Image (tube, rainbow, N blue to C red):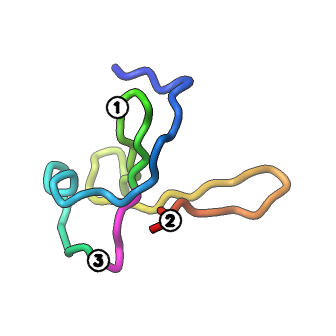
Amino acid sequence: MIDLIGAKITRVRFMTKDELEAQGWDWEGSDSIHPIVALELDNGAVLYPSQDEEGNGGGALFGHKAGESDFYVWPRE
């Protein structure tokens, strides 16, 4: 088990073709209209959203901060 407590995000990017294929998810190319965001951590872990706990496809990553608007996570590319 990987301990995520205290790990820091070092990069926000899209999943690579190899990462998508390793999950059994469709690769639509770099111009995909539904790219999946990946968060790289300083401990070597990579986090990404899934449609469900079985990993039946990628998902969108949203968040909320008290007193502010909801947001979604997207790379600055």
Check disc 1 and give the amino acid type: Gly
Distance between the Cα atoms at labels 3 and 1? 26 Å
Q: CA distance from mark 2 to mark 3?
A: 16 Å
Q: CA distance from mark 1 to mark 2?
A: 21 Å
Q: Nearer the viewer, mark 2 or mark 3?
A: 2
- Classify residue 7 as left or right of residue 31: right
Identify the residue under disc 1: 44
> How dense is the environment of label 1, judged by Cα within 10 Å: few (below 14), some, or many (20 and up)?
few
Indicate whether 64 appears above or below 46: below
Magenta residues (range): 33-37
Tell whether 31 sits left or right of 64.
left
Determine whether, in the image, residue 42 is placed left or right of residue 63: left
Quarter holding the N terminus is top left
Q: Amino acid at mark 2?
A: Arg
Q: Indicate the quadrant where residue 70 lies.
A: bottom right
Q: Is residue 41 above or below residue 70?
A: above
- Residue 76's tag is 2
Give me the disc on residue 32.
Answer: 3
Q: Picture coordinates of residue 21 (x, y %)?
A: 14, 56
Callout 2–callout 3 Cβ contact below 8 Å? no
Number of other residues with Cα within 10 Å of mark 3, as a class: few under 14, some 14 to 19, many 20 or more: few
The reply to whether the C-beta atoms of the residues labelled 3 and 1 are less than 8 Å apart is no
Residue at 15% x, 54% y is 18
**Nearer-the-camera pick, 48 or 9:** 9
Q: Secondary structure at mark 3?
A: loop
Residue 42 image offset from top left, x and y in percent: 44, 31
The mark nearer the N terminus, 3 or 1, is 3
